Amino acid sequence: MTMNYQQQAKNYRYYTDSNVGSEVTRKTLVIVLAGGAGSRLMGLTRWRAKPAVPFGGKYRIIDFALSNCVNSGLRRISVLTQYKSHSLIRHLQRAWGFMRAEIGEFVELIPAQQRQSTEWYRGTADALYQNLDIIRRHAPDNVIVLGGDHIYTMDYSKMLYEHVKSGADLTVGCIEVPRKDATEFGVMSVDEEFRITKFTEKPADPAPLPGKPGKSLASMGIYIFTKSYLYASLIEDAEDHDSAHDFGKNILPASIPNCSVYAYPFVRKDGSPAY
C-alpha cells in the first residue's frame, strides 16, 4: 500500500502534532535561511555567518527572526545553515534549546548536507529544494520562508491569516521605500486588491506606487507558500538549468502570470510603515 506524504510524515522519527497556537499556526512550518556570508560586513563575518553577528551584547541578528516567530505563535522552525556556521549553531543550541519537542515546538538545525547533489546550495530556492524531503516530513499546510539576517519586529501571524483568507498560492511581505532607493530591492507592481502583477529584482527604473510617485513597493524577502505550490515550484525550478535558483530572481517572477500571488504591506493600522 502506497502512503501519502501526510501518512509518511507520521512515521518520521521527529514528527509531532503541535499543541501551541491556532490551527493555522500549528500547521505552518517556518524556514529561516541562515547561510549567508554577509560579504559587505566582512569585518564582522570573517569567522561567522551574517545571522550570527552579535547584536546588543549577548544576542545575534538571527534572534530577531526567531523571536518574531515565537511571538507570532509559530514554533515549528527549521534553520538552514551553510557558510561558517559553527558560531551560529552554538548560539542556537544554547539560546533556543528551551523549545519543547513533546508539544510540537522546535528550532531544528539543518546544515548543508548535499542531499540532492554534490553541490552546495546554488541559491535560496535550491536550499529548500535540497531539503524538500525534510520539509515534507513535517507535513505543513503552509510554509513561511524568512531571511535570518534582517533586523525588524513583525507579527507573522497577521500575514499568515491574510494569506489563508485570500486563497493565495504565494504571499510576499513588502514595504514602501523611496523610489530613489528601490534599485537595491526587488520591486513589485500591484492591482487594487494588492495582487502582484509584475516583479523586478533590483530594477534600474523602479515602478512607482499609484498615487505615490516618490515611493516604490519593495519585497521584504518574506514569503508564505501553500505546501502544494511550494513543492511544485521548487521541483520545476530545479529542473531549469538556466535558473539562478533564487526566490526573488526566479520563483516569484515565474509565479505571477499563472498563480495567485499577493503582496502583504507591512504597515500600522493608520497605514504608516510599521518598520
Image (tube, helix red, strand yellow):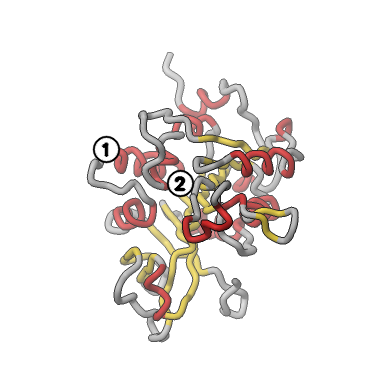
Residue 95 coordinates in the image, percent (x, y): 73, 44
The total number of labels drawn is 2
From the viewer's perspective, is 205 left or right of 5? left
The answer, for residue 88, to whether it is visible in the render is yes
What residue is disc 1 on?
A: 239
The answer, for residue 72, to whether it is visible in the render is no
User: In the picture shown, does residue 8 fall above or below 194?
Assistant: above
Q: Quick one: 81 or 206, which is closer to the camera?
A: 81
From the viewer's perspective, is 140 left or right of 91? left
Name the residue type under label 1: Glu
Q: Residue at position x 44%, y 40% from top?
A: 128
Quarter-of-image position of residue 132: top left
Q: Residue at position x 65%, y 33% from top?
A: 17
Q: Secondary structure at mark 1?
A: loop
- Label for residue 143? none
User: In the picture shown, does residue 3 fall above or below 228?
Assistant: above
Q: Which circle's residue, 1 or 2, is located before the other in the chain?
A: 2
Q: Quick one: 177 or 54, which is closer to the camera?
A: 54
Q: Secondary structure at mark 2?
A: strand
Name the outermost residue toward the top. 1
Judge depth for marks 1 and 2 and give the one in front.
1
Contact between marks 1 and 2 (CB within 8 A): the answer is no
Residue 139 coordinates in the image, percent (x, y): 53, 34
Name the residue type under label 2: Thr
What residue is disc 2 on?
A: 226
Q: Quadrant of the C terminus?
A: bottom right
Query: Dot 2: few (<14), some (14–19), or many (≥20) neighbours within 10 Å?
Result: many
Residue 96 coordinates in the image, percent (x, y): 71, 43
Q: Residue at position x 61%, y 56% from top?
A: 157
Q: Residue at position x 68%, y 59% from top?
A: 55
